[in-house]
Image: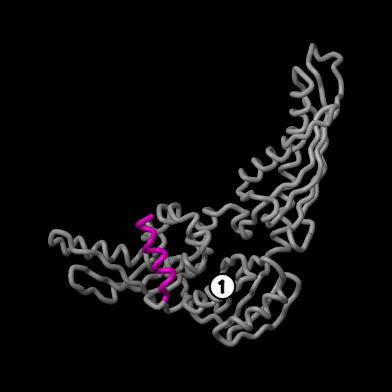
Amino acid sequence: MKRFSHLLMAAALVAAVGCSGNRKSSVNPAFETEVVEAEGMSPVVNGDVEGARKTALHEAMKNALGLVVGVYVSQDAMVSKSVLIDENITSQSEGYIEKYETLKEWRDGEFCKTRIRAHVRKEDLSAKLRTLETEPQKLGNPVVGFDIKESAGEEGKQTSYAELELKNRLVEAGFLTGDKDKADILVKGEASSSFNTREGLGGFVSYRAGVSLSAVKQGSQETLASVQEAAGGIDLNDAAAARASIINAAKKAADPLKDRILKSLREKSIVRLNLAGVKTINDLSEFTKVLRNIPAVRASWVRSFSGGTAVLDVAMHKGGAADLSQLLMKASKKPLKVNRTSSYDLDAELE
């Protein structure tokens, strides 16, 4: 975590890091690199100036990479994935920097400092960053709550077998779960089991269960997904067989429910923002800061940046593209022109 503080510092203090835009890769012209300027520093320990110079250069590379990471990754993801980012990206900075030139080296008291201009391979970097986030995190990391009425067996015993199974399955898929009253998405419905047969089971008993579920966005009450499934369960006694049948039905429902929630979130909860007139990555960095400070915006991600146009996915707490366009025109530090809006798409331009 200590090493990662350099990355956060570089992402936050953009004024200390310069940029000269994106260029074609000299290694492979089909790809582009981000050209950024950054500084690194290191203390001189036991008179080892050469060692301090090498460390300062390495820190400058990490900070150059940190600026690009800060644009392409949401702040929440940077915090939650800090160790992975540090170990998989910044510690291997040379692998993502195509080339660099040293602009200045100097001694400042007991520290050696270095300023570089680095060409960062953004395709490689963005591809690696995407592997560090789960699909729910890419879609805003919504919290899922549960309100399922369950009854097991002939006596209608109240249980929570289906809820626990669904919760475990969604957590495995990368979702956050929490209190139903504070959740972004509420999974609600019914689950029940009833006796099936004892005949021909060698002392075992069979039960049959059904679940009917829907996933609803809190506030708007928009239904994101719905699913109905049934399954059987066999065990040595009625209670255990009833429990097994409900768990099996919930297990059967979990995957289609998860997939439909993710599909709906991709289509309906994310505004695709096509932003033209972006001259440098510094401009894009400043814009993403403004964007993420809008209360109605849950998170945002840069999907691509090329030829002066950036494509961003914007996760909204509420509202759609029309709402976002109004909020951006009020919040943007630079003049912003909105060219087109639809339900979930927004074309805008920095003037």
**Looking at the picture, how far across and down is residue 302, in whole percent?**
56, 68
**Looking at the picture, how far across and down is residue 55, in whole percent?**
26, 62
Asked whether, in this view, residue 80 is left or right of residue 214, the answer is: left
Q: Is residue 199 above or below residue 51?
A: above
Magenta segment, prevailing SS (helix, strand or loop) = helix
Q: Nearer the viewer, residue 55 or 191?
A: 191
Residue under the point 86% across and 25% down: 195
Asked whether, in this view, residue 72 is left or right of residue 39, the answer is: right
Residue under the point 40% across and 70% down: 119
10 in magenta = yes
Asked whether, in this view, residue 274 is left or right of residue 161, the answer is: left
**Looking at the picture, how far across and down is residue 254, in whole percent?**
72, 42
The N terminus - image quarter: bottom left
Q: Which stretch appears magenta? A: 1-14
Q: Amino acid at mark 1?
A: Asn
> What residue does disc 1 label?
293
Q: Quadrant of residue 108?
A: bottom left
**Looking at the picture, how far across and down is residue 72, in whole percent?**
52, 66
202 in magenta = no
The C terminus - image quarter: bottom right
Residue extending farthest to the top is 202
Residue extending farthest to the left is 47
Q: Quadrant of residue 57?
A: bottom left
Q: Nearer the viewer, residue 133 or 3?
A: 3
Q: Nearer the viewer, residue 156 or 251?
A: 156
